[in-house]
Amino acid sequence: MSTKKTEEAVWFAMRVTYKRELIAKQLLERQSIETFIPMRYETRRSGMRKKHELVPVIHNLIFVHTEQSKIQRAKERIPFLQYMTCSGSGEKIIVPEDQMQRFIAVAGTYDEQLIYFRDDEVNLAKGVKVRICGGEFDGQEGVFLKVKGARDKRVVIAIQGVVAVATASVHPSQIEIIP
């Protein structure tokens, strides 16, 4: 009987130097490692033409879903890929699966009304924990609060210590308070 413990895949929050997050994504996916980069459409001018292209929202940020041993081997081949760590403890930031899935469900829509914040730019303690009932973000949970840069309250989904995203406006009738 084998007692070998199998490693579990987790979401690592990682940094990539010099805006090479898309290169890191490509290299990791070639090794069958799942990744997520928050992206949005931007209109850019190239000479006389305007191009609508998908670009990273936060440069140098990538989320990687894999086992510890596999990411360690990948880091040896990708020297510009680094773990993000908690400022207090120095521990690697590992994002819980359910939190990451909520973040991907919102950030993966590429909605132009989404607002992104650094972790220290939004105070979640001032809001109310809610669930969205209906619409594009149906079933998502977050904190309902007023955010800088928006006229009305938004539901904020945060990855503690890394990033937060505020949804597009959600009508109060589509919000259920979570006790």
Image (cartoon, rainbow, N blue to C red):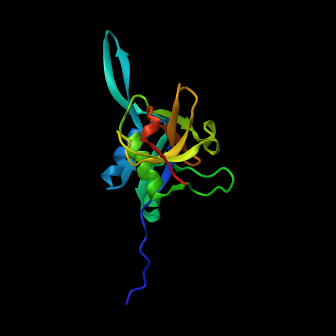
Q: Residue at x 62, y 36 (%)?
A: 121
In the rendered image, the residue lying farthest to the right is 88
Residue in the foreground of this view, choosing between 140 and 178: 178
x, y percentage for residue 138? 37, 45
Q: Is residue 30 above or below residue 1?
A: above
Residue 76 appears in the picture as rendered: no
Q: Residue at x 61, y 58 (%)?
A: 91
Q: Is residue 31 above or below residue 128?
A: below
x, y percentage for residue 78? 44, 49
Q: Residue at x 49, y 58 (%)?
A: 96
x, y percentage for residue 52? 32, 23
- In what quadrant of the picture does the C terminus appear? bottom right
Residue in the foreground of this view, choosing between 3 and 113: 113
x, y percentage for residue 70? 42, 62
In the rendered image, the residue lying farthest to the bottom is 1
Q: Residue at x 43, y 67 (%)?
A: 8
In the rendered image, the residue lying farthest to the front is 173
Q: Quadrant of residue 112?
A: top left
Residue 156 appears in the picture as rendered: yes
- In what quadrant of the picture does the N terminus appear? bottom left
Residue in the foreground of this view, choosing between 160 and 57: 160
In the rendered image, the residue lying farthest to the top is 48
Describe residue 129's horizontal placement relative to residue 3 as left or right. right
The total number of labels drawn is: 0
Q: Is residue 111 above or below residue 156?
A: above
